[in-house]
C-alpha cells in the first residue's frame, strides 16, 4: 500500500494533469474550430469514397497521415460539394464546406451528380452506368459496330467527363446491382455506405485531435513550466505545497462533476462557428482561477519575474518565487536578491525547453489522455486516500 506522502504526491500530480488537460481540451477545440478540422475531415472522407487511392510509398503515406488540414481538390469532389444540397449546408465565411450532413443528403447529391436532377428510371440508370464506367477508365469512345450497341448518354455528358474514379464507380455499381433495379433500395444502400464511412471518419478525426491535443499539451507544459519530474520533486519535499494541492484536489472533486464539465464543452462544440470561440473562452475563464492557484503553490511558469529572493536553508540555496536555478549561475545577489534582464527572461524561457524537454514530453502525453480520464482516476485515488485514513 502507498504511504501517505506518495499517495498525496500522486493526487497532486493528477490534479495538475486534470486542470491542464481541461485547458488543453478547450484550446484544442478552439484550434479545431478555427482550422475547420471537422469539415476538412468530412471532405476527406467523401473524397475517399468517390476517388481511387493513388499508389504511393511508405514515406508519402506517413507524410499524408501527418497532414491535419487536408483539403482535397479535384473535379469529382468539387462537383459533389458544388451541388446545392451540400453547398447551402455550409457557412458563408472562410470555411464554406459543412462540418456534417445527413446520409439522405449524401445519397440525394450523389444520385444527382451521377444521373442528373429530377425523376429518373432504372433503365436510364443502367444506360448511364456504361458512360460513367467508360469515362472513369479514361478510355476513348468505342466505335460501335451496330447502332444498337451505341452507348447512349441520356444526359449528354461531355466526352470523357469523369464524375467518379474507376474503382469507386465499380463499387457503387455493385450497390445498384444489389438493389435489383429498385431506386429506393439503391438510395438506402448509399446511405448505409455513407454511415459506415462516417463511423470510420469519426475515428480519423479522433486520431487527428489526439495529435493536436498532444502538441497543445506540450506547448502548455512549456509555457506554464509543467514538468512532471519537477512537480514530483516539489511535492515530495514541500509538505505545505503537498497539503495545499491535496486540499484543492479534494475541493475540486466535491464541487465539480465531469458530466457538467463535458456538457459545457460539448454545448460549446455544438454551436455555430461564430459562437464557439466565445463559448470556449468562457470555459477557459472558469479554469483560470484554479490554474493560477496551483501555479502559485508550485511556482510554475516559464517567464522569469524581475527579481527573486535568495533563500538559504538546510538543503542548500533556493529562490522565491521558485525558479529553475540554471539561470542563476554566475549571478551575484545584491542585498539577497537577483535581478533579471529582458535577455535573461528569454534565455530562461528557451532554456527550460532544453533542460526539461522530457518532463514536458511526459506531461504532454498525460494531458492528451483527456480530462475525463484524470477526473475519474483522481476521484478513485481520493476515495482510496479517505478509506486508508479511516482504516488507520
Image (cartoon, rainbow, N blue to C red):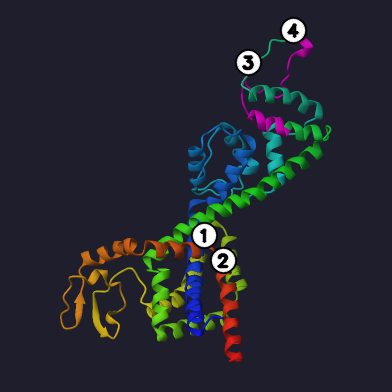
* 158 or 136: nearer the viewer: 136
Residue that carries the numbered disc 3 in the rendered image: 140
Q: Earlier in the sequence, mark 1 or mark 4?
A: 1
Magenta-drawn stretch, dominant element (helix, strand or loop): loop
- Characterize the local packing of mark 2: few (<14), some (14-19) or many (20 or more) Cα atoms within 10 angstroms: many
Extent of the magenta region: 145-172
Q: Earlier in the sequence, mark 1 or mark 3?
A: 1
- Characterize the local packing of mark 4: few (<14), some (14-19) or many (20 or more) Cα atoms within 10 angstroms: few
Disc 4 secondary structure class: loop
Residue 223, horizontal then vertical, whole percent: 37, 65
Disc 1 secondary structure class: helix
The numbered disc on residue 145 is 4
Residue that carries the numbered disc 2 in the rendered image: 265
User: Does 120 appear above or below 387?
Assistant: above
Q: In which quarter of the image is the C terminus?
A: bottom right
- Picture residue at 49% right of the left edge, 38% below the top: 60
Between the C-alphas of marks 1 and 3, the distance is 49 Å
Residue 185, horizontal then vertical, whole percent: 81, 39
Q: Are marks 1 and 3 in contact (CB under 8 Å)?
A: no
Between the C-alphas of marks 1 and 2, the distance is 9 Å
Q: Do the residues labelled 1 and 2 touch (CB within 8 Å)?
A: yes
Between the C-alphas of marks 2 and 3, the distance is 55 Å
Disc 3 secondary structure class: loop
Residue that carries the numbered disc 1 in the rendered image: 29
Amino acid at each position: 500500500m502507498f504511504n501517505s506522502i506518495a499517495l498525496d504526491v500522486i493526487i497532486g500530480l493528477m490534479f495538475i494533469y486534470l486542470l491542464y488537460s481541461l485547458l488543453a481540451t478547450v484550446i484544442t477545440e478552439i484550434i479545431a474550430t478555427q482550422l475547420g478540422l471537422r469539415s476538412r475531415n468530412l471532405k476527406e472522407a467523401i473524397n475517399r469514397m468517390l476517388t481511387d487511392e493513388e499508389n504511393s510509398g511508405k514515406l508519402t503515406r506517413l507524410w499524408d497521415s501527418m497532414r491535419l488540414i487536408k483539403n482535397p481538390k479535384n473535379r469529382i469532389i468539387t462537383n459533389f460539394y458544388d451541388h446545392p444540397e451540400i453547398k447551402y449546408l455550409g457557412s458563408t465565411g472562410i470555411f464554406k464546406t459543412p462540418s456534417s450532413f445527413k446520409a439522405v443528403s449524401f445519397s440525394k447529391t450523389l444520385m444527382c451528380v451521377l444521373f442528373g436532377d429530377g425523376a429518373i428510371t432504372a433503365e436510364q440508370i443502367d444506360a448511364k452506368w456504361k458512360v460513367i464506367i467508360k469515362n472513369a477508365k479514361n478510355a476513348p469512345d468505342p466505335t460501335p459496330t451496330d447502332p444498337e450497341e451505341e452507348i447512349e448518354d441520356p444526359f449528354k455528358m461531355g466526352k470523357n467527363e469523369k464524375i467518379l474514379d474507376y474503382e469507386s464507380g465499380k463499387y457503387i455499381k455493385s450497390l445498384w446491382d444489389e438493389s435489383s433495379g429498385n431506386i429506393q433500395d439503391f438510395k438506402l444502400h448509399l446511405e448505409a455506405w455513407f454511415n459506415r464511412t462516417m463511423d470510420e471518419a469519426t475515428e480519423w478525426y479522433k486520431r487527428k485531435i489526439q495529435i493536436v491535443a498532444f502538441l497543445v499539451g506540450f506547448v502548455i507544459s512549456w509555457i506554464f513550466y509543467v514538468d512532471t519530474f519537477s512537480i514530483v520533486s516539489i511535492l515530495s519535499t514541500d509538505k505545505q505545497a503537498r497539503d495545499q494541492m491535496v486540499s484543492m484536489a479534494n475541493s475540486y472533486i466535491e464541487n465539480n462533476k465531469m458530466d457538467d464539465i463535458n456538457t459545457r464543452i460539448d454545448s460549446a462544440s455544438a454551436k455555430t462557428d461564430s459562437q464557439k470561440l466565445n463559448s470556449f473562452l468562457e470555459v477557459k475563464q472558469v479554469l483560470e482561477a484554479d490554474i493560477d492557484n496551483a501555479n502559485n503553490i508550485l511556482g510554475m511558469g516559464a517567464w522569469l519575474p524581475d527579481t527573486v529572493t535568495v533563500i538559504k536553508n538546510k538543503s542548500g540555496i533556493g529562490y522565491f518565487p521558485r525558479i529553475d536555478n540554471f539561470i542563476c549561475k554566475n549571478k551575484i545577489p545584491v542585498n539577497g536578491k537577483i535581478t533579471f534582464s529582458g535577455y535573461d527572461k528569454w534565455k530562461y524561457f528557451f532554456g527550460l525547453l532544453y533542460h526539461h524537454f522530457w518532463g514536458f514530453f511526459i506531461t504532454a502525453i498525460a494531458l492528451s489522455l483527456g480530462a475525463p480520464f484524470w477526473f475519474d482516476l483522481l476521484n478513485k485515488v481520493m476515495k482510496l486516500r479517505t478509506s486508508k485514513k479511516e482504516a488507520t
